Amino acid sequence: MSNNSKRVKRIVFAGLFFFVIMFIGVFCALMYDSKKDVSEDERYAKCLNIPFKLKEHATIRWNANNLRFKNYSLILNEASAYDTPEVKSVKIYQPGETVTFISAKSYSSLHVGTTYYLIGRDTLDTGEVIDFEYYYTGDFPLFE
């Protein structure tokens, strides 16, 4: 084999190696996420440990595949009765009932940006105490 042939093979191998490393780097960057407690931030601290009265129905829903903080989520303006292996409605609130949030968290991911969640706590009819998340946009349109 000539020196040119060996040199071409090395260049091709180096290029392929660089491409694989770049692909792995991009994949890891897309998969990266960060979770932080932001309860001390005044924007969220003002919402914590205060009972909020619901104006409309709301449902706490369990989801087997939740990727953020809790498998339970508060869904406002809904009185659903899901009962599948992946999604179940576990508690339905009536208008006038209250919800209290105990902490605030941020979730950052390179492909979705940063989102904020309030974490609440309640007791189900079974006696089980659960924590649930509520996607927080900065206002409470369905709370009094």
Image (cartoon, helix red, strand yellow):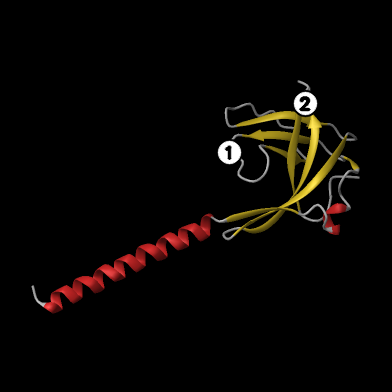
Extreme residue in the left direction: 1
* Image quadrant where residue 87 sits: top right
Extreme residue in the top direction: 126
Q: Which quadrant is home to the N terminus?
A: bottom left
The percent position of residue 139, horizontal first and vertical second, equals 83, 54
The percent position of residue 79, horizontal first and vertical second, equals 75, 33
* Secondary structure beneath label 1: loop
Q: Is residue 98 above or below residue 32?
A: above
Q: Is residue 90 above or below residue 32?
A: above
Tell me the residue that label 1 is attached to.
Answer: 65
Identify which amino acid the numbered label 2 is placed on.
Answer: Leu
- C-alpha separation, residue under disc 2 versus residue under disc 1: 20 Å
Q: Which mark is residue 34?
A: none
Tell me the residue that label 2 is attached to.
Answer: 124
Question: What residue is drawn where x is 19% and y is 76%?
Answer: 7
Question: What residue is drawn where x is 52% and y is 58%?
Answer: 30
* Image quadrant where residue 65 sits: top right
Q: Within 10 Å of the Cα at label 2, are there few (<14), some (14-19), or many (20+) other Cα atoms?
A: few
Q: Within 10 Å of the Cα at label 1, are there few (<14), some (14-19), or many (20+) other Cα atoms?
A: few
The percent position of residue 82, horizontal first and vertical second, equals 65, 29
Q: Which quadrant is home to the C terminus?
A: top right
Horizontal arrangement in the rendering, residue 114 relative to residue 141 (left or right): left
Identify which amino acid the numbered label 1 is placed on.
Answer: Asn
Horizontal arrangement in the rendering, residue 135 relative to residue 111 (left or right): right
Nearest to the observer: residue 34 or residue 141 = 34
Q: Is residue 138 above or below residue 65?
A: below
- Asked if the residues shown at circle 2 and circle 1 are in contact, with their CB atoms under 8 angstroms apart, the answer is no
Horizontal arrangement in the rendering, residue 129 relative to residue 30 (left or right): right
Question: What residue is drawn where x is 59% and y is 55%?
Answer: 33
Nearest to the observer: residue 88 or residue 27 = 27
* Image quadrant where residue 32 sits: bottom right
Nearest to the observer: residue 87 or residue 4 = 4
